[in-house]
């Protein structure tokens, strides 16, 4: 680009021999072009470095979060198993410890499943394993599973017999991550609403919670890989910053539209729109 600009400038000066001070103009022109290229290169270099630094910081935070998320349940399971070795524990205490261990194992499984899926999504360009699946049934099954595991009140308004062409496991991962997000950032006493509606071959899935909500400035950032809000309440909750990234990636692979809105009086609503 620099050579082409210089050749063009010199060609202009050669043609316009009548101009006074040709040499001076040539030097000034060369200097201006060179300075413009340097400024442009500096800006691009700074932008690239900023992106790299930001990515490295996110990856570091991700590794710290994963380490914490792995160590905590493993330590809890170890303590429970050590306690169960004792023969003098009452039956009720044994049941409580087993239930706690089972809960921590599910947490570990969910984390490893998300990490594996996130690594696979980086290499998937299109969904090759799609088939017609009973989407309504999958939503109901996941809602009931989360109700049993977490003991949360989930209000369901899901129309029946909605079938879509999609990857079944990815749909479960998409919905479970959205439900997990709603549960994680809302109080145990609050309600979660899940609705599936259809109109003119267009379906809309809504997951609404009454939690801490999402600031307008972060409504697009939350779908970035490894992103964790700077909000202290959000950062204190369990998480690695890949759940909503997985949701967004699955939506893109299936050509779904996703957005997040404020729930009133508080909380968030994740809305997914797709054709049937």
Image (cartoon, rainbow, N blue to C red):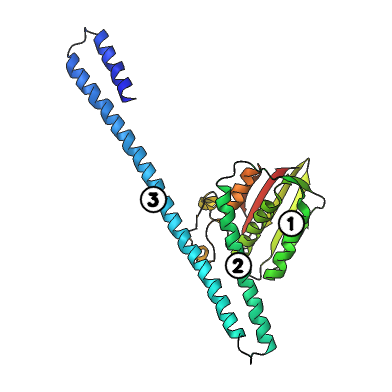
- Please report whichever mark, 1 or 2, sits nearer to the chain's N-terminal start: 2
Query: What crowding class fits label 1: few (fewer than 14 Cα within 10 Å), some (14-19), or many (20 or more)?
Result: many
**Disc 1 designates what residue?**
139
Residue 41's image quarter?
A: top left
Q: Residues within 10 Å of mark 3 (few under 14, many from 20)?
A: few
Q: Secondary structure at mark 1?
A: helix
Residue at far right of view? 161
- Residue at which label 2 appears: 107
Q: Secondary structure at mark 3?
A: helix
The residue depicted at 25 percent of the width and 26 percent of the height is 32
**Residue 48 in sight:** yes
Marks 2/3: CA distance? 31 Å
Q: Are marks 2 and 3 in contact (CB under 8 Å)?
A: no
> If you read the primary sequence from the N terminus, does the residue marked by circle 1 or circle 3 appear first?
3
For label 2, the crowd category at 10 Å Cα-Cα, with few meaning under 14, some 14 to 19 and many 20 or more, is: some
| Gap in angstroms between the C-alphas marked 1 and 2 | 20 Å
Q: Nearer the viewer, mark 2 or mark 3?
A: 2
Instruction: Say if 111 sits above or below 162 in the image.
Output: below
Q: Residue furthest bottom?
A: 88
| Spot occupied by residue 59 in the image (x, y as percentages of width and height) | 45, 55
Distance between mark 1 and mark 3 Cα atoms = 39 Å
Task: Using residue 141 as the reference point, say whether residue 121 is left or right of it.
Answer: left
Which residue is disc 3 drawn over? 53
- Residue 230 located left or right of residue 255: left
Residue displayed at 57% across by 83% down? 82
Left or right, 188 with reference to 198 = left
């Amino acid at each position: 680009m620099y050579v082409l600009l210089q050749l063009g400038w010199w060609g202009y000066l050669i043609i316009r021999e009548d101009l006074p001070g040709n040499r001076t103009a040539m030097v000034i022109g060369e200097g201006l072009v060179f300075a413009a290229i340097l400024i442009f290169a500096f800006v691009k270099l700074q932008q690239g470095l900023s992106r790299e630094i930001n990515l490295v910081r996110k990856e570091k935070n991700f590794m710290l979060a994963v380490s914490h998320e792995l160590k905590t349940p493993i330590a809890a399971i170890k303590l429970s198993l050590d306690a169960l070795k004792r023969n003098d524990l009452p039956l009720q205490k044994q049941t409580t410890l087993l239930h706690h261990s089972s809960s921590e194992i599910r947490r570990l499984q969910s984390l490893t499943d998300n990490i594996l899926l996130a690594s696979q999504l980086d290499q998937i360009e299109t969904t090759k394993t799609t088939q017609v699946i009973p989407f309504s049934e999958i939503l109901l099954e996941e809602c009931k599973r989360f109700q049993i595991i977490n003991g949360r009140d989930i209000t369901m308004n899901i129309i029946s017999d909605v079938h879509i062409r999609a990857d079944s496991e990815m749909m479960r991962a998409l919905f479970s991550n959205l439900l997990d997000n709603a549960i994680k950032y809302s109080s145990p006493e609050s309600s979660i609403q899940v609705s599936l509606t259809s109109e003119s071959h267009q379906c809309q899935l809504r997951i609404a919670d009454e939690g801490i909500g999402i600031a307008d400035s972060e409504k697009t950032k939350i779908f970035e890989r490894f992103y964790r809000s700077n909000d202290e309440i959000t950062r204190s909750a369990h998480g690695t910053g890949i759940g909503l990234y997985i949701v967004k990636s699955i939506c893109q692979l299936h050509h779904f539209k996703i957005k997040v809105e404020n729930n009133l009086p508080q909380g968030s609503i994740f809305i997914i729109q797709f054709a049937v």
